[in-house]
């Protein structure tokens, strides 16, 4: 396993002599600003893309346009911290433009939890990270893994660009979705990932779809009710290791989860094993906003008995990159482990595929 650096972005920024500015506002910028405060990294300004400035302010700083920031400091003198996420091609093109003109970084901050992927964290978990690297089943997975690790330490977009996968190839050649007839979608949102699977799995007949957020579940139920095939059994519950009640973020967005902050409600949490009650599935998708460990535990019997294909998100928690592959390998060492990542900044949509 080759890692090209022996430091991390936060150490580098803490000694930088350039003005450091945030690109973007919102939750991601809040997290990055908090880390900068922790490390004593001063933020000089905040900006948005040209055409998106409407007199906003962020943490007491007026939000400038990109053109105004360049005029104020000079592009060659700027360090830009990208502070929001996107997978939209036109937005990724904007990121590339800023990256070509300024010293741009996309800091890796976790969706859940406060643990940062620093060089000290990397060194303390090197053995687990190397163990996962050795478990990966093909060279493409190992290449993606090395680039993701390099990105997490440096924040450089070039490493993310070198760690992208084609969705058609993943569903077609790797997951062989044409053979999937029964599936479980854990974190089904409004039915979008069921709809995506349907496009690649013409033989799909039955889906168990779990979604805890009440507004998302309403949309999921409407989607399921309009279908004649496949039969989508919508379950208003969080995927978990046991039957319980959880405090859940009442946000109504894609990132709603049991570990989010803000307004909360109580939701039912259930293990997939209890929902299936011994029924087999060919495929399980886990995208449950930081609860992947518990969701895997809650489907252990299904995995051991029926050996379904698995697709598991590896980007919500800093430790997911090694903890979840090792958990699955311990549960069933016969699985072949593949890593694939769809275009996204930061390193989201990173998935472990188990066959």
Image (cartoon, rainbow, N blue to C red):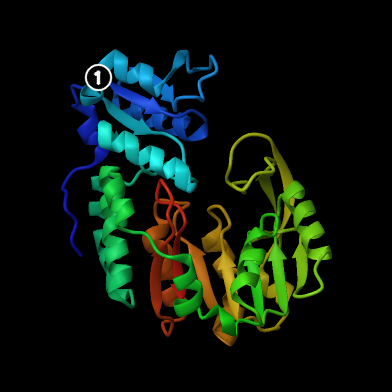
Residue 297's image quarter?
A: bottom right
Q: Which residue is at the front of the view, 45 or 227?
A: 227
Any part of residue 281 in sight: yes
Please tell me whether residue 139 is drawn above or below residue 124 in the rendered image: below
In the foreground, 278 or 96: 96
In the image, residue 342 sits, relative to residue 117, either above or below, namely below
**Residue at 46% from the left image edge and 43% from the top image edge:** 90
Is residue 289 shown left or right of residue 170?
Answer: right
Label 1 belongs to which residue?
A: 74
Quadrant housing residue 144 = bottom left
Q: Position of residue 243 (x, y in %)?
A: 71, 63
Image coordinates of residue 226 in percent, x first then y, are 83, 64
State the quadrant of the N terminus. Answer: bottom left
* Total number of numbered discs in the rendering: 1
Q: In which quarter of the image is residue 18?
A: top left
Q: In this view, does 68 lie above or below 313?
A: above
Q: Which of 233 and 174 is in front in this view?
A: 174
Residue in the picture at 31% in, 70% down:
140
For the question of whether residue 121 can be seen, the reply is no
Q: Report x, y in % for residue 94.
A: 40, 38
């Amino acid at each position: 396993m080759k890692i090209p650096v022996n430091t991390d972005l936060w150490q580098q920024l803490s000694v930088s002599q350039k003005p450091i500015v945030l690109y973007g506002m919102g939750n991601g910028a809040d997290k990055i600003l908090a880390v900068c405060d922790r490390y004593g990294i001063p933020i000089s300004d905040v900006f948005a893309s040209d055409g998106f400035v409407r007199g906003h302010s962020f943490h007491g700083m007026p939000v400038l346009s990109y053109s105004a920031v360049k005029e104020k400091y000079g592009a060659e003198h700027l360090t830009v911290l990208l502070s929001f996420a996107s997978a939209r091609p036109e937005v990724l093109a904007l990121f590339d433009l800023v990256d070509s003109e300024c010293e741009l970084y996309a800091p890796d901050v976790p969706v859940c939890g406060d643990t940062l992927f620093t060089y000290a964290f990397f060194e303390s978990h090197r053995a687990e990270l190397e163990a996962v690297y050795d478990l990966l089943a093909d060279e493409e997975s190992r290449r993606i893994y090395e680039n993701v690790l390099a990105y997490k330490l440096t924040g450089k977009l070039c490493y993310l660009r070198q760690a992208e996968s084609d969705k058609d190839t993943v569903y077609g050649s790797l997951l062989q979705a044409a053979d999937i007839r029964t599936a479980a979608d854990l974190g089904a949102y409004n039915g979008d990932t069921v709809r995506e699977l349907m496009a690649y799995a013409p033989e799909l007949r039955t889906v168990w779809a779990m979604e805890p957020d009440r507004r998302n579940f309403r949309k999921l139920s409407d989607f399921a009710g309009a279908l004649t095939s496949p039969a989508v059994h919508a379950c208003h519950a969080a995927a978990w290791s046991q039957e319980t009640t959880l405090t859940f973020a009442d946000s109504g967005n894609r990132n709603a989860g049991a570990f989010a902050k803000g307004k909360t409600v109580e939701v039912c949490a259930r293990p997939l094993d209890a929902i299936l009650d011994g029924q087999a599935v060919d495929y399980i998708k886990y995208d449950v906003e930081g609860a992947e460990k518990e969701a895997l535990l809650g489907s252990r019997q299904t995995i051991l008995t029926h050996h379904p294909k698995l697709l598991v998100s590896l980007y919500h928690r800093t430790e997911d990159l090694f903890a979840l592959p090792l958990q699955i390998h311990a549960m069933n060492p016969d699985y072949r482990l593949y890593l694939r990542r769809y275009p996204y900044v930061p390193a989201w949509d990173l998935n472990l595929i188990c066959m």
